[in-house]
Image (spheres, helix red, strand yellow):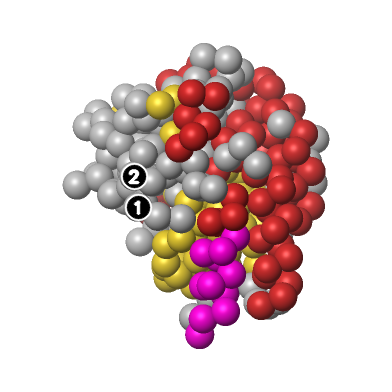
Amino acid sequence: MLLELKQGILYGPVNSRRYGKSLGINLMPAEKKLCSFNCVYCHYGTTKRCTMNIDQYSGEFPEFDNVVKALEKKLKAPVELDLITFSGNGEPTLYPQFGELVEAVAELRGKYRPEAKIALLSNSTGLACEDVVDSLDMIDMPILKLDAGNENTFRAINRPARSIKFEDIFERLFSLDGIYIQTVFVNGQPSNIGKDDLADYIECVARIKPQEVHLYSIDRPVPNARISLVPPEKLEKMAVKITKETGVAARAFYE
Ligand code: SF4
């Protein structure tokens, strides 16, 4: 069973061993996945709407005011939470007023939950937009995807919308400070853990110099039966190698 798509604007708080209690914000159309990638391992299944151009879907996003109202109501309620996370059914930065919304969320956080952190889980493609880059200053944990160190593997694993190039994503990540890199490693066909692929990836991490690298593999059913899990022991060894060769703290996460 793949994961069910989120039905509304807010979900959780969900318990995460990494981050504590996280309240998710889903800015994508309800029960529809909209993403600029179609990753081979995506737990939401195949991306039927794989694009950077949201014009044709503009009427389907949740209204700005409704997002703000829903969040304010939740933050005022006696609900424990450590983190407010932009995530959901696809790529959150595709939301048309993303920067403006981050500002509104930061304001509400300051008013009702000053102790909570704001996180963004993004596939990094939104960094092409100045407004998204500017909003990162208001996000405590910008967690950005990098699953490959070269164009071929990037295309095989993330299967991006046509206009997206690996080099552009790398350059944008390289230009940022204080980011977290999140990586999903998979075995099989395709794979991103071969010797050369790993060397290219490590070189990218060394140059980007993120605050931390978070490594995962698949832990639920995925749409592609030809890929498989990288076992926890191997993921741990990869984390040690990445830290040793880049000086960046790398942590492996698995259930
Ligand atoms: S970026 Fe995330 S939501 Fe989009 S296809 Fe990949 S795993 Fe799924």
Look at mark 1 in the image and give the residue it sits on.
7
Residue in the picture at 75% in, 38% down? 131
Residue 171: image tag: none
Residue 140 in the image: x percent, y percent? Answer: 70, 60
Q: Is residue 226 left or right of residue 233?
A: left
Q: Is residue 215 left or right of residue 255?
A: right
Q: Is residue 17 visible?
A: no
Is residue 41 placed above or below 135 in the rendered structure? above
| Magenta stretch: includes residue 241 | no
Corner quadrant of residue 111 = bottom right
Q: In this view, does 172 lie to the left or right of 229?
A: right
Corner quadrant of residue 16 = bottom left
Are the two marked residues, 1 and 2, in contact with CB atoms closer than 8 angstroms? yes
Residue in the picture at 52% in, 14% down? 162
Residue kind at label 1, given as amino acid type: Gln
Residue 113 in the image: x percent, y percent? Answer: 65, 77
Magenta-highlighted residues: 68-78
Residue 129 in the image: x percent, y percent? Answer: 71, 31
Q: How far apart are marks 1 and 2 (CA)?
A: 5 Å
Look at mark 2 in the image and give the residue it sits on.
31
